[in-house]
Image (tube, rainbow, N blue to C red):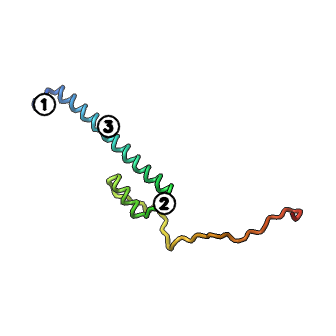
Amino acid sequence: MKLKISEMSPAEIAEEGKRLIKLAREKEAELKNKTTLALGLILNREIDNSCATSKAELEAEIEQVTGKKADLSGWFAEQKSEPVFVTESPAVPAFENETGV
């Protein structure tokens, strides 16, 4: 049974304090590892899906993981229009060497 601090000796209080600090550091490291892992999974997903998630959705997801406001404006180039994809390339002239072959 844990004693109240008022019932503990100074040595017991110091020992309990050390134990609590150690526990807090372990929990902090565990939380940091979970956050780093979650951010890594988000990054991998975005790489695998060619960055298909919108900036707003990604910011919200990162904010949920970190508990802090995410501002990704420096990571995204603002698009003025829809991207244009070329499906056919123009004909490329055949390469000829000096002999005409």
Q: Quadrant of the N terminus?
A: top left
Q: Residue furthest bottom?
A: 81
Q: Secondary structure at mark 3?
A: helix
Q: Which residue is mark 1?
A: 3
Q: Secondary structure at mark 2?
A: loop
Between residues 31 and 9, which one lies in front from this camera angle? 31
Q: Secondary structure at mark 1?
A: loop
* Numbered disc in front, either 3 or 2: 2
Q: Horizontal and vertical percent for residue 40?
A: 44, 49
Q: Horizontal and vertical percent for residue 18?
A: 25, 31
How packed mark 2 is, by other alpha carbons closer than 10 Å (few <14, some 14-19, many 20 or more), is few
- Mark number, residue 51: 2
Disc 3/disc 1 C-alpha distance (Å): 23 Å
Q: Look at the picture and state if 64 lies above or below 31.
A: below
Quarter of the figure with residue 92: bottom right
Q: Look at the picture and state if 27 lies above or below 99.
A: above
Identify which amino acid the numbered label 1 is placed on: Leu
Tell me which residue sits at (40%, 60%) in the image.
58
Give the mark nearest the N terminus, 3 or 1: 1
Asked whether the residues under the numbered discs 3 and 1 touch, taking CB atoms below 8 Å apart as contact, a structural biologist would say no
Disc 3/disc 2 C-alpha distance (Å): 34 Å
